[in-house]
Amino acid sequence: MLRALLALCFLTVAATAHADEWPTRPITMINPFAAGGPNDVFARLFAQRMGELLGQPVILENVGGAGGMNGASRVAKAAPDGYTFLLGTVGTQAQNQLLYKKPAYNSTTDFEPVALVVEAPLVLVARKDLPVKDMKEFVAYGKANASKMQFGSAGTGSAIHLGCALMNSVTGLDIMHVPYRGANPAMQDLASGRIDYLCDIVTTAKPQIEGGSVKAIAILNKERSPVLPNVPTALEQGYDVEAYTWNAFFLPKGTPEAIVAKLNKATVDTMKTPEVREKLESVGLRFVSEDRTTPKYLGDFVKSEMAKWAAPIKAANISID
């Protein structure tokens, strides 16, 4: 028994020393989506600045597939030593848990939450020649022409898909869904008039809206977006639809508290970096307030997001084997 106690003390001291020294080598940030997606600008800026603050390079690695579940699963199974962490989203940490019959991980028990960072609303955009100018006309047109219309998404179960599913449910629309392999090809087909509408993240929809290739109908949030100030919210137009995505960082379960605290501090300090804030706010991302950046807040937030999305996913009868 004495030997066992001594061994336990040795392991505890060793783990504490390791946490105190961390990091001593490069760290990997897993972006669970393919390169070129809406997370990339955020990930590159944060990886660079966090590396400067931590004194070790933060290497960005894209691990796409299964709606982000492949990349998130890799982090869930990684060694809890602080050298692999996840750029998580509402999709990887909340929606996938409800969509898949057998998720590859449990988002509430397989990760150590680090910090919630930014939120980005979705915006309802339509093909430019759709004969509507606001939400009420859009809903009326959709009900009258439901059998002829289609809406696109970045794939079944993606945040973009679920945003439109929620909007359809609230407005009483029943429109055919066309899943694409990513947001970019869906937007290209919308601009070409092959589909009728899309609920895209404001960061990727903004250039298309400003260029006139698609038509903005409503911001799916309670507040207007500063980068699209002339686009009214759905709520302003009489429809209580709130759909947004977010980014947060997660470590594997069991990562020492000291390492979680160091990564949290690097995250918050990066959020305060003027160049980072300016670049990300200019594309429509909104930084959360500092009181929402604690690990405890993020853990509770993930649970609340799962509860929020359970009803619309069930109502739309969306599931993935």
Image (cartoon, rainbow, N blue to C red):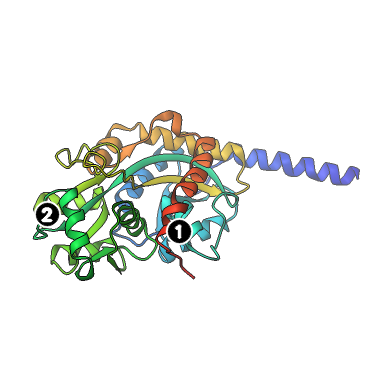
Residue 241's x, y, as percent?
31, 46
Tell me if 163 is positioned left or right of 127 in this view: right
Hey, which residue is sitting farthest top in the picture?
291
Crowd band around label 1 with a 10 angstrom C-alpha radius: few (<14), some (14–19), many (20+):
few
The answer to whether residue 29 is seen in the rendering is no
Q: CA distance from mark 1 to mark 2?
A: 30 Å
Name the kind of residue labelled 1 in the image: Lys
Q: Residue at x 74, y 44 (%)?
A: 11
Residues 5 and 246: in front is 246
Asked whether disc 1 touches disc 2, contact meaning CB atoms under 8 Å apart, the reply is: no
Residue 305 visible? The answer is yes
Residue 224: image location, x then y, percent:
23, 38
| Residue 39, x across and y down, in percent | 33, 52
The residue that mark 2 highlights is 132
How far across and how far down the image is residue 256, in percent?
A: 62, 42
Q: What element does badge 1 sit on?
A: helix
Which residue type carries mark 2?
Answer: Val
Label 2 environment density (alpha carbons within 10 Å; few <14, some 14–19, many ≥20): some
Q: Is residue 15 left or right of residue 21?
A: right
Which of the image's four quarters has the N terminus? Answer: top right
Q: Which residue is mark 1?
A: 314
